Amino acid sequence: MDGFTCDMCGKVLLADENTRYIVRIEVLAAYDPMELSADDVATDRRGEIQRLLDAMRQADPEALQDQVYRRMQFDLCPACQKRYLAHPLPEPPASGTNADS
């Protein structure tokens, strides 16, 4: 079992360390149950569905996939595993900036 490096610091794992850690991250779109009314059911949505399908044909498949689900896996050395557990999310951006841009 060789060939692993820490995805945070680049340290060679299993040669320099006895232990490596695996971090798995799943990002899922959270869809809450919707309530449908009689009007919702009776409304013809074929045009709306067609517009969505046309837009999807023009979009980047990976970007579409990221809107629904993404799974990632990272190898960490013991030191980076401790740092990750202490702060699993990056610091929020400075006030006045938008993380979505």
Image (cartoon, helix red, strand yellow):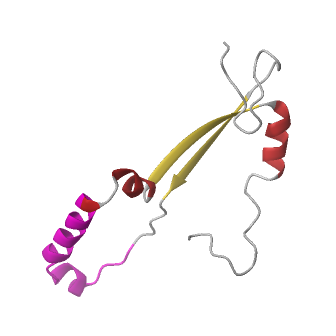
Measured as percent of width and height from the top left, residue 69 is found at: 46, 52
Outermost residue to the bottom: 39
Measured as percent of width and height from the top left, residue 85 is found at: 80, 46
Say whether residue 46 is left or right of residue 16: left
The answer to which image quadrant residue 92 occupies is bottom right
Residue drawn at (74%, 39%) of the image: 8
Is residue 36 a member of the stretch shown in magenta?
yes
Q: Nearer the viewer, residue 78 or 54?
A: 54
Q: Nearer the viewer, residue 76 or 94?
A: 94
Residue drawn at (26%, 61%) of the image: 58
Q: Quadrant of the N terminus?
A: top right
Magenta-drawn stretch, dominant element (helix, strand or loop): helix
Q: Which residues are magenta?
A: 34-57
The answer to which image quadrant residue 46 occupies is bottom left
Above or below: residue 21 compared with residue 51: above
Residue drawn at (28%, 84%) of the image: 37
Residue drawn at (23%, 59%) of the image: 57
Outermost residue to the top: 1
Measured as percent of width and height from the top left, residue 82 is found at: 84, 41
Question: How many labels, in total?
Answer: 0
Q: Quadrant of the C terminus?
A: bottom right
